[in-house]
Image: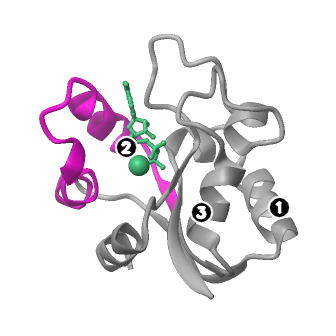
């Protein structure tokens, strides 16, 4: 078994989709090891998104993540890192596949490209690093 960091981002919390997203995660059989509502400060977000510093979407992304609370989840399961990313769907909800969180619940990206409901760590190294930041 392994662990990953999942975030229900501010758009997911604000739209009241936390429960719907958790239902999909639980239905898949993943275990909630820890869960909390968080209002991260800029420093936490700069650590979390360090790999994106300097990219054009970085500042809007950090601002968006500061716009309201997120739900942080320590999630465990067999190959959960890869599995949750598959459950979440591709980055852009406009084209994410039906059946995925972003494909079914995400809104057309339009100009608000950062609003895609969830985050999931992309590797064991990222998961360890990000879990230490949020928990
Ligand atoms: P996460 O699980 O959130 O990390 O998504 P990801 O791994 O599919 O995307 P990535 O790590 O490349 O980017 C992190 C976040 O930045 C994404 O979830 C989006 O919210 C945002 N993002 C990524 N690419 C773009 C982009 O081209 N434009 C904008 N505005 N935002 C982007
Ligand atoms: Mg990523």
Q: What number is the disc on residue 65?
A: 2
On whether residue 41 falls in the magenta region, the answer is no
How many C-alpha atoms fall within 10 Å of the one at disc 3: few (<14), some, or many (≥20)?
some
State which quarter of the image contains the C terminus: bottom left
Quarter of the rendering containing residue 84: bottom right
Q: What number is the disc on residue 82?
A: 3
Q: Position of residue 128 (x, y in %)?
A: 36, 78
Assess mark 2: CB under 8 A from ligand 1? Answer: no
The residue at 34%/73% (across/down) is 125
Q: Nearer the viewer, residue 116 or 81?
A: 81
The residue at 56%/67% (across/down) is 81
The residue at 44%/45% (across/down) is 68
Depth check, mark 2 against mark 3: the one in front is 3
Identify the element where label 1 is drawn. Answer: helix
Residue lying farthest to the top in this orientation: 110
Q: CA distance from mark 3 to mark 1?
A: 18 Å
Res. 131 visible in picture: yes
Report whether 20 appears left or right of 130: right
């Amino acid at each position: 078994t392994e662990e990953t960091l999942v975030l229900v981002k501010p758009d997911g919390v604000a739209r009241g989709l936390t429960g719907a997203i958790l239902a999909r995660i639980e239905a898949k059989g993943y275990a909630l090891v820890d869960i909390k509502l968080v209002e991260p400060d800029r420093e936490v977000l700069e650590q979390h998104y360090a790999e994106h510093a300097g990219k054009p979407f970085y500042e809007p992304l950090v601002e968006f993540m500061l716009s309201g609370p997120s739900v942080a989840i320590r999630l465990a399961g067999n190959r959960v890192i890869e599995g949750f990313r598959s459950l979440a769907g591709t980055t852009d909800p406009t084209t994410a596949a039906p059946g995925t969180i972003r494909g079914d619940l995400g809104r057309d990206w339009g100009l608000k490209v950062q609003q895609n409901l969830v985050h999931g760590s992309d590797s064991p190294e990222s998961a360890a690093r990000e879990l230490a930041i949020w928990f």
